[in-house]
Amino acid sequence: MSFTAKDVMTLRERTGVGMMDCKKALTETNGDMDKAIDYLREKGIATAAKKAGRIASEGIVYALKKGNVGVLVEVNCESDFVAKGDVFKGFVESVANYIADNDVKTLEEVVSTKEEDRVAAVAKCGEKIDIRRFEKYTTKDGVIETYIHMGGKIGILLEATVGSSESVLHDVALQIAASKPSYVVRDQVDPAELEKEKEILSAQALNEGKPQAIIEKMVQGRINKYYKEVCLMEQEFVKDNTLTIAGYLKANGNSQIVRFARFEMGEGLQKKQDDFVKEIMDQVAKVN
């Protein structure tokens, strides 16, 4: 029985075991998923595998700056208690340093390389741990700035041209954390997304009973407001609403923001919901 890369990913999701071990297990069992799970348990990789069915929706976002290299990484665990512990934090830092020091291209590479360390951290923490995502910027002539908010709940990584001071760029990173822009400038807005927004705004205007003759002007006005919400350079500066971010930078060194990444810990993940009654009943069923 043959297997595909998707099968390897499925086995990893079901067991929590690293990619290379999953591939080896499927090779040894001719692609049989159930036998591969048994194989992994028999080989003693069950320490992490037992945690696989749990939901890792807590954790931290961590930022690292090394000269002209910046890294932003999110690693998840099951509880805020473990997320604040030294073992978990040490593992997260080791992941960020590995990414910073090596020419990594994919998350799979990071997960595979750090698997032994992850399993060791799981054994010490007693919880499932997942390396969820990362962003890495390397700049030749620019500068890197990072910002972590609320102890790892939100993380920002940005690249800018030389000009503005570190404190000014720190303010811009804080702006990104607070105001959630999606783009640097309006030219970067996805045309399909913009067209969809126009359709929604047109429908809103029609539902408000506005005459067709003025709907186009109304939509354009609302699109300009939309740009001010999603484009960093057009947003009002949170520390001084008389300035846009573009105006603030122009008055303070005139750096240009090249790109940015914003991670909010756990966004999009299913949150763990404890069902103590079900847990007790499951334990009773096992005894019986």
Image (tube, rainbow, N blue to C red):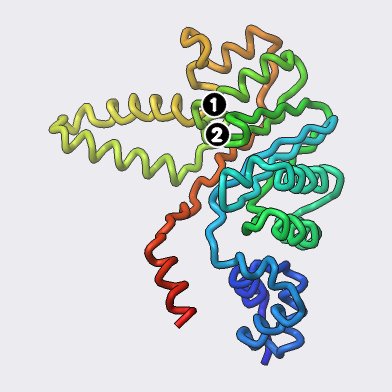
Image quadrant in which you'd find residue 282: bottom left
The answer to which of marks 2 and 1 sits earlier in the sequence is 2
Crowding around mark 1 (Cα neighbors within 10 Å: few <14, some 14 to 19, many 20+) is many
In this rendering, is residue 226 above or below 103? above
Q: Residue at x 39, y 42 (%)?
A: 195
Coordinates of residue 245 in the picture (x, y in percent): 56, 17
Asked if the residues shown at circle 2 and circle 1 are in contact, with their CB atoms under 8 angstroms apart, the answer is: yes
Q: Which residue is mark 1?
A: 232
Q: Residue at x 63, y 71 (%)?
A: 15
Image quadrant in which you'd find residue 20: bottom right
Crowding around mark 2 (Cα neighbors within 10 Å: few <14, some 14 to 19, many 20+) is many
Q: Residue at x 56, y 29 (%)?
A: 177
Using the numbered discs, state the Cα–Cα distance from disc 2 to disc 1 in whole angstroms. 6 Å
Q: Which residue is mark 2?
A: 183
Task: Classify mark 1: helix, strand or loop.
Answer: helix
Coordinates of residue 30 in the picture (x, y in percent): 71, 90
